[in-house]
Image: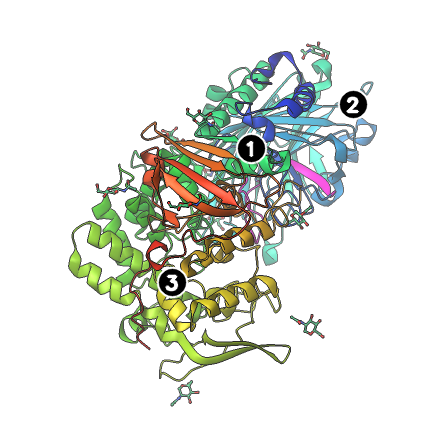
Amino acid sequence: MAPCKRSSWISPQLCLLLVHLVLPFAVAGADVLQFIDPLIGSTNGGNVFAGATRPYALAKPVADVDGQNTGGFATDGSNIVGFSAVHDSGTGGNPSLGNFPLFPKLCPGDEVSNCKFLIADRATPYVTDSVVSRPGYFGVDMASGVKVSMTSSEHAALFRFEFPDGEGEHPMVLLDLTDLWKSRQNASISVDADGARMKGNGTFLPSFGAGSYVMHFCVDFFGGQVFDGGVWVNNRGGTEPKDLFVTRGFNLFYLEAGGWARFEGLSNNTLTARMGISFISADQACQSATTEIPDPSNDFDRLVAETEDAWREKLSPMSINPGGASEELQSSFWSGLYRSMISPQNYTGENPHWDSGIPYFDSFYCLWDAFRVQHPILTIVDPNAQVQMINSLLDIFEHEGWLPDCHMSLCNGWTQGGSNADVVIVDAYVKNLTGIDWDLALKAVVQDAEVEPLEWAYHGRGGLESWKDLSYIPYLDFDPAGFGTNSRSISRTLEYAYDDYCLGVLAQGLGHDDLYDKYATRSTNWQHLWRAQQTSLINGSDTGFEGFFQPKYQNGTWGFQDPIACSSLADFCSLTTNPSETFEASVWQYQFLVPQSMSTLIVLMGSEESFIERLDFFHTSGLADISNEPVFSTVYLYHYAGRPGLSAKRLHTYIPSAFNASHGGLPGNDDSGSMGAFVVFGMLGLFPMAGQDVYLISAPFFAEVNITSPLTGKTAQIKTTGFDAGYENIFIQNVTVNGQPWTKSWIGHSLFTEGWTMELVLGNQESEWGTKVEDRPPSWGGANVVV
Ligand SMILES: *[C@@H]1O[C@H](CO)[C@@H](O)[C@H](O)[C@H]1NC(C)=O
Ligand SMILES: *[C@@H]1O[C@H](CO)[C@@H](O)[C@H](O)[C@H]1NC(C)=O
Ligand SMILES: *[C@@H]1O[C@H](CO)[C@@H](O)[C@H](O)[C@H]1NC(C)=O
Ligand SMILES: *[C@@H]1O[C@H](CO)[C@@H](O)[C@H](O)[C@H]1NC(C)=O
Ligand SMILES: *[C@@H]1O[C@H](CO)[C@@H](O)[C@H](O)[C@H]1NC(C)=O
Ligand SMILES: *[C@@H]1O[C@H](CO)[C@@H](O)[C@H](O)[C@H]1NC(C)=O
Ligand SMILES: *[C@@H]1O[C@H](CO)[C@@H](O)[C@H](O)[C@H]1NC(C)=O
Ligand SMILES: *[C@@H]1O[C@H](CO)[C@@H](O)[C@H](O)[C@H]1NC(C)=O
Ligand SMILES: *[C@@H]1O[C@H](CO)[C@@H](O)[C@H](O)[C@H]1NC(C)=O
Ligand SMILES: *[C@@H]1O[C@H](CO)[C@@H](O)[C@H](O)[C@H]1NC(C)=O
């Protein structure tokens, strides 16, 4: 069944209806698009982009609201303030992009002088039940009676505004020279004499970064004749002049301004607006729009169908036999996979700063989030894109001097911990991706480890002198070499140690054994902050665990951070909010973040039993923050203590209770698809230890999964015996790979590239499988504790 593959003969609403009629009979081989709900995570802080987009595309039209608008739209019942063509997905903090929104309206008495232009005055509720969102299509009805639908190509958005019947009225569309965050510095617009085209640009600030960027637009209107048009400032519009330059004046006061046009003779009361976007020039925006959408009045259905096909293609490496798993779980799975390919964004040909002829990606927002599971899922389902993204990171290194940790809107974003591009690169290296200049990669990663930039707030690492001399990042470090927020000494120490481990692996692979020795040694630096006598109290009562990471001054004296500080039981800690020695999570959380040497960590914690007790306490006491990425691996770390069954059990306490198919079904910011990728891996029954050729094996949520490698064309099969969709049988009893017993609780990437068949026997009790020391996931450095 392929419903809606070509939707030109039926309306989107009818199509959805058909899908729902057919759904109960859906089986493997059904159209996966029916399971994709872009509204998952559209409220409750998921901040997903819920509109129309092609995979990784620049153009991302959606309705912008005045409530939770980080991704533009939210199902929070707030008001629509515009329809804009570019967005980021899943980010936290300030809303990103949303530049140059259009807004359709009727002026009272058909008088421009009666029209309200300002955001606060034009805000209009939407009809809750009218929202339709599916791949390539977003539609919503406004309480004003205007019905709006939209789709997109790579660099342009196509909007349809259907106005209510109104005798003798001249519907208006205004364009606001703003973005969601109102970060605009100055901007220009020119409205063609006949009003049918508006062009211009604006200078804006990146939502989580330094510097500024210029964006250009080109809008054309179709479906009727222009009645009149011009520019507006504050709540006043006029037909002259036709050009406007607006800036930020006294006290950086924010003046609202833009262009407008009114129309007559609309066929079916419908006005079509085509908006091209470019980072190069308004002419390039016009060029992309006319090339990609040459016949705006008739291209809508073609664009939707092409977008649907593009998504089917991107999702095609995976197929599942749900084995009775609910449609909600399937929707979580496919929607998660979908969201992991919305961003980073492909800005190839749109980089005004350099043109090296290789694909250019941006909106790495941020690698601190995305390195853990989003990039690893791309390595499996879209390795060609992953290679292009890594080459973009290396291209940024060559032209800007450093690998970024976060990069959006052509600007550097703020670094949250270590230099995580290192992990992304090494993850690709150990999984044998090709088409990457590994010597260049080594140079870039070594620079992160050796050279401190003046501004380590947005690239590289800080405190490198201390890192080299003292082998830890000191509490209140004296660091005159460079500048960043001088906090996070514990989490930076842990992250730098892992970055160095990854660097060592790359160096060794490229034949630099000397470098390997050096960085392998540095990767043990985390041990210097382990304070064996540290205890942890909650409300005055001892949790009973002894030994935690603690901050240490330059002189070797211990500082103190309450191990529960920055957890869900205490205050949030970020770069500027309550800066602490751990970033966005507690010492309790960070105590588990030693992915290179888990066995050593377990020794420091006393015993495997004690390690397991800590994990259990962490996950059941309210200390674990499932809404933020550092928590992901902790769900699975029982594998390292020989108890893979407990990982599966823990996972089921979070899916679906914290990750589900409702509009508020993500526990936190999706972060460029990270939450989505976590769900996908969880349901596949594999968890990647990013930076290592290691996937921890657990029971899948489906009876059978096939994953075809886009590189080799071979199909990995994950099969189960004893699968039950009630999830009693979540414990692996036995595993075979290609028919041979597989005793290890982990497997490498060859599963995918070689197309192995992994068969799992499931039962309702833990078994012996994966419990032996030699069957545990690799752990570097054994138990050679240095403190
Ligand atoms: C626009 O604003 C940017 C950033 O504030 C500034 O660099 C630029 O000079 C301004 N352009 C004009 C024409 O004023
Ligand atoms: C923005 O548009 C104005 C008016 O067309 C033009 O003078 C200016 O050069 C443009 N700015 C940039 C950065 O292209
Ligand atoms: C106008 O609407 C009618 C009824 O929905 C439809 O048949 C016709 O094709 C539409 N015309 C145009 C130009 O879109
Ligand atoms: C996986 O591939 C095998 C071999 O082609 C096929 O028999 C099986 O039905 C597929 N399973 C799924 C879930 O697609
Ligand atoms: C990004 O866009 C460029 C230019 O259109 C294209 O060559 C490249 O394949 C795209 N990358 C992906 C992963 O789609
Ligand atoms: C600590 O005490 C406060 C006040 O009595 C209470 O609200 C909170 O739930 C307690 N926290 C824990 C983790 O027990
Ligand atoms: C080490 O430095 C800290 C912070 O300056 C200070 O409080 C402590 O007394 C010092 N310890 C020693 C042994 O000098
Ligand atoms: C779905 O997930 C959200 C976000 O984590 C959670 O608040 C909600 O309780 C979950 N719903 C169900 C029915 O489990
Ligand atoms: C698992 O495999 C072992 C040996 O490979 C065998 O002895 C045992 O019976 C199997 N257990 C189950 C539950 O299949
Ligand atoms: C990568 O290549 C190396 C050397 O050929 C090989 O040993 C390893 O198994 C490969 N790993 C994967 C995941 O393909």
N-terminal-most mark, 1 or 3: 1
Q: Is residue 259 above or below residue 622?
A: above
CB at mark 3 closer than 8 A to ligand 10? no
Q: What residue is drawn where x is 25% and y is 57%?
A: 504
Residue 87 magenta-drawn?
yes
Q: Are marks 3 and 2 in contact (CB under 8 Å)?
A: no
Which x, y percent locates residue 724?
58, 39
Which x, y percent locates residue 243?
58, 33
* Residue tagged 3: 598
Question: In terms of secondary structure, where does tag 1 sit?
Answer: loop
Task: Please identify the quadrant where the N terminus is shown.
Answer: top right
CB at mark 1 closer than 8 A to ligand 4? no
* Residue 375 visible in the picture: no
Q: Amino acid at mark 3?
A: Met
Question: In terms of secondary structure, where does tag 3 sit?
Answer: helix
N-terminal-most mark, 2 or 1: 2
